Amino acid sequence: MSRVNPVMRRGSTADKPFDTVVTPENAGWRFSGLRVLDLPIGARARFRTGEDEMLVLPLAGGCDVTCDDERVTLTGRRSVFSRVTDFAYVPRESWVTVRAPNGGRFALPAARAERRFPFRYGAAEDVPVELRGAGQASRQVNNFCTPESFDADRLIACEVLTPGGNWSSYPPHKHDEAGDGESSLEEIYYFEVSPSPAGGAGSGYQRVYGHPDRPIDVCAEVRSGDVVLIPYGWHGPSMAAPGYDLYYLNVMAGPGAREWIVRDDPAHGWVRASWAGMPVDERLPLTSSKERTRP
């Protein structure tokens, strides 16, 4: 098993101004990273991207993003459960300022990059929204920075929303070996859970397991702001507790071509065939590019 604890609790890797910091160095790998920025009203944060290409992805609230001498304004959203958001791409070797007039929380998915792409805006209306699975394995995937939807050097990122009681990242799959039918990608899962009407904090669960020669064994309760690292191995399901919708942000990067090709665990891949003729959960999609009135 990796020497790095694959479960990072909210705030455990904080390094001002960031609430969460995952780098290739502290994750024990080579390419994938994530920072989460929590800004009070009127605050700003300035940082350098260094060797990483990044996105500025609003989780709650909107912001102005300045990259060197250019600026874009992100409308953002009230929460990850209210809307598909717009976002900004910022290249490596750049100075970036994020300013939140009304405060907010922002994810910065990152990948160690070689090429320098231009700073640019991604519109919420252009994000492909996909419904995957069926029945209790139904989920929504917002493919805002996948190879088919948005250009980058190495970074691959998407959002997954799973209605309460459903399983996603299912059947279990992996992408840790380059070859036919699989790509090699390090992956980060960042979680948020919909709030309880009674004011309590909800939770979900994440499973990761390895190979005989590369062991990893995770079955973790996750709450809003928690991170699970997946350096290798089969991962799934991601389980949403009944009554609590589950959100996770996937951040991936690897050494080869920018491809997202997964291999199902052969012990469980048969489950896909059982979905034939089964409807997708009628609660989906949970969000679109239009604001939705819900917590």
Image (tube, rainbow, N blue to C red):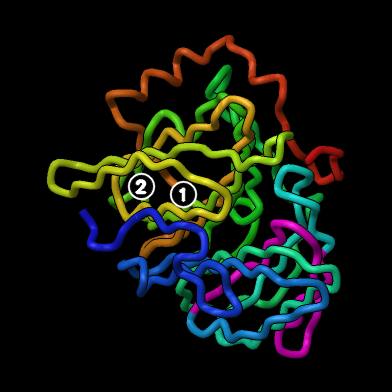
Task: Residue 260: give its label.
Answer: 1
Amino acid type indicated by mark 2: His
The verdict on residue 73 being magenta is: yes
In this view, the residue in front, 16 or 213, is: 16
Closer-to-camera residue (1/271): 1
Image location (x, y in percent) of residue 104 = 75, 65
* CB atoms of marks 2 and 1 within 8 Å: yes
Image-based side of 176 in relation to 168, left or right: left
**Amino acid type at image mark 1:** Trp
Residue with the mark numbered 2: 175
Q: Give the image quarter of residue 94.
A: bottom right
- Give the mark nearest the N terminus, 2 or 1: 2
The residue depicted at 48 percent of the width and 45 percent of the height is 222
| Residue drawn 50% across the image and 72% down it | 14
| Helix, strand or loop at mark 2 | loop
Residue drawn where x is 64% and y is 58% of the image: 150
